[in-house]
Each structure stands twice: as C-alpha cells, then as structure tokens.
Image: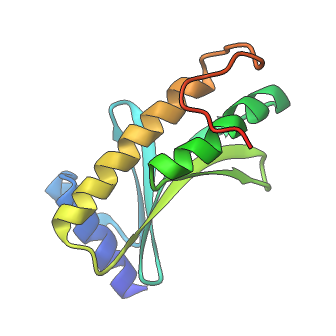
C-alpha cells in the first residue's frame, strides 16, 4: 500500500493540491474542485478518481443511463452504480506510469466530466426529450 499512497501524493502534487495537506494523505483523499467533492483512491498500479452523483430514482437513472454510451466514446470516465446504496458515481483510472503532465490532463478531463454529469443530474428534462450528444442503441 505504500506505493499506492506515494502515487496518490504524486497525483495530488501534480494537480496543485495544497502542499501542506499532502503529507497526511495515505492511500486516498477527498477534496473539492469548483464546489464538487471528488476522491482519489490508490489501487494496484495506479489511482482511481471518483465523483459521487448521489442517489438516483428510476427516472433519473434511466435518463442518465441514456447518456452513458455516448459519453464513454467521448471521455475516459465511466458512469457506475454502487449496488450497496443505490448511488451513482463516475470514475476514471490513471496508471502509475503516467507522467505528471498526463496526470494533470486526465484529472482536468475528469473534473470537466464530473461537472457535466452533475449538471445533468439536476436538469430535470422530460425523459422523452432527446438530449444533446446521445447515442442510443
């Protein structure tokens, strides 16, 4: 787990996390970006960025699920459902062999994705309306 914690620290340094808070980080950390709480967690061979969207009712799940196939083509983050509590989240993996510049670019794309998904969670458009950039099977 030591290597995992070191890579988490390296990622946090690369994305500009406050240096005075980094020594306390072990193998995961929660932090806020543009008002959105995100998490970085170490795992074998890299880290996983996560953003919790929260609980979703069936209508919201169906609406957000209709975006998933189009978004997976466009970005590296993936929409997922946590079966233990029924909440939605997005995640993205970054390998430990990535350069600091690649980590920053990955995180920037992830943060943009988190903002996009967060906006869609609360937009409340009718389900039968065709939203932007949706690929339907």
Q: Residue at x 60, y 20 (%)?
A: 122
Describe residue 107's horizontal placement relative to residue 43 as left or right: left
Residue 116, position in %: x, y? 47, 32
Residue 114, position in %: x, y? 46, 40
Residue 16, position in %: x, y? 18, 52
**Image quadrant of residue 37?**
top left
Asked whether 76 or 27 is in front, the reply is: 76
Work out which residue is located at the far right of the displayed protein and give it: 58
Residue 107, position in %: x, y? 32, 53
Image: 136 above or below 63: below
User: Is the image coloured rainbow, by chain, by secondary structure, or in one colour?
Assistant: rainbow
Asked whether 14 or 132 is in front, the reply is: 132
Q: Residue at x 27, y 74 (%)?
A: 98
Q: Residue at x 44, y 47 (%)?
A: 38
Image: 35 above or below 96: above
**Image quadrant of residue 42?**
bottom left
Describe residue 5's horizontal placement relative to residue 19 as left or right: right
The number of numbered badges drawn on the structure is 0
Describe residue 113's horizontal placement relative to residue 137 as left or right: left
Which quadrant, please, contains the N terminus?
A: bottom left
**Image quadrant of residue 27?**
bottom left
Asked whether 67 or 99 is in front, the reply is: 67
Which quadrant, please, contains the C terminus?
A: top right
Q: Residue at x 33, y 69 (%)?
A: 8
Q: Is residue 119 visible?
A: yes
Asked whether 60 or 76 is in front, the reply is: 76
Q: Is residue 22 visible?
A: no
């Amino acid at each position: 787990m030591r290597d995992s914690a070191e890579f988490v620290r390296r990622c946090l340094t690369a994305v500009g996390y406050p240096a005075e808070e980094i020594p306390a980080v072990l193998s995961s950390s929660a932090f806020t970006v543009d008002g959105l709480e995100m998490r970085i967690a170490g795992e074998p061979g890299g880290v996983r960025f996560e953003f919790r969207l929260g609980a979703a009712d069936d209508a919201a799940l169906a609406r957000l699920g209709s975006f998933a196939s189009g978004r997976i083509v466009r970005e590296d983050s993936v929409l997922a459902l946590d079966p233990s509590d029924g909440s939605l989240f997005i995640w993205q993996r970054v390998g430990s062999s990535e350069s600091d510049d690649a980590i920053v670019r990955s995180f920037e794309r992830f943060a943009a994705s988190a903002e996009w998904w967060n906006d869609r969670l609360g937009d409340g458009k009718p389900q039968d309306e065709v939203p932007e950039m949706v690929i339907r099977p």
